[in-house]
Amino acid sequence: MLQRIADGVWSQESVVAMGPGGVFRMPCRATIVRLDDGGLVVHSPIAMDDRAASELDALGDVRALVAPNAMHWLFLAAAKARYPKARVLAAPRLSQKLAGFAFEPLPARGGVDGLDGLRVERVHGASGVDEHVFLHEASRSLLVTELLFNIHACESFWMRALLRVSGTWRKTAQSRAWRMFVDDRAAAARSATAILSLDFARVVPAHGEPIEDDARARTREALRWMTAGAPPLLGEGSLPA
């Protein structure tokens, strides 16, 4: 079932099994946002049954499907089959995983042509992830995937153990795995600074609960490892509050 997060923003939640025997069961979210013209965008699609699709169809016309990084693509083809008229936009890195599957590469920053009301900011310096953060301007909601987690409930013992190891269990945090993903700390710091400069009041992660209270401060703290890699002239003292 779809759940309303804010005006023009809805959530579809599920659990995705990973690893040997599917022992790592990760809470996942697809976020649906309404564009300025009334069309809908499905950000990071997950498996959708007929009931969820019926609820989505009742909200409006699905104009676009978005795979925002190199990891969130597993349900993209199924979503496209259900909504064949929808545009597909994806992280450019996915050209290596989606050979033969047509999509439009996401821009590095700014608006997306034809999707008025959405802005994008690519996280540079972690090329293997190719994360693209989105701002839904009308609701001031920041949509993120691997950039940070906010998981406070998880049915899988092994997933909870992995989240503890990664430093992301029951708090707003960036996984310690980013320290392996980042191949250019200065570029990552510039991207984190750009994200913190966006006009958001809420964060909607693909993994975990939406962040409504002190969203800017909690995001700033979660991204501190990234911003600490800023060159001397872009030190943490100059970062947005």
Image (cartoon, rainbow, N blue to C red):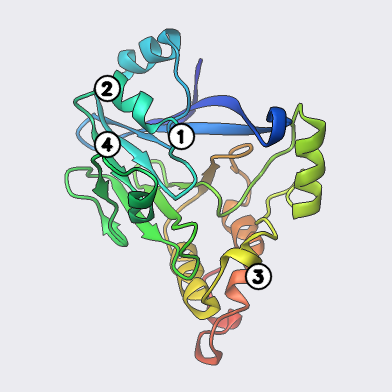
Q: Amino acid at mark 4?
A: Leu
Report how far apart the C-alphas of labels 2 and 4 lie in the structure: 17 Å
The numbered mark, 1 or 2, whose residue comes first in the sequence reads 1
Mark 4–mark 1 CB contact (< 8 Å): no
Answer with mark 4 or mark 1, whichever residue precedes in sequence.
Answer: 4
Residue named by callout 3? 225
Quarter-of-image position of residue 88: top left
Q: Secondary structure at mark 3?
A: helix
Mark 4 vs mark 1: in front: 1
Indicate the position of residue 26 as horizontal and vertical percent values. 65, 34
Number of the label disc, if any, that sits on residue 35: 4
Q: How many marks?
A: 4
- Secondary structure beneath dot 1 equals loop
In-image side of 155 versus 26 (left or right) = right
Residue at mark 1 to residue at mark 2: CA–CA distance: 16 Å
Lower position in the chain sequence, tag 3 or tag 2: 2
**Residue that mark 1 sits on:** 74
Vertical placement of residue 60 versus 139, above or below:
above
**What amino acid is labelled 2 in the image?**
Tyr
Query: Is disc 1 surrounded by few (<14), some (14 to 19) or many (20+) residues within 10 Å?
Result: some
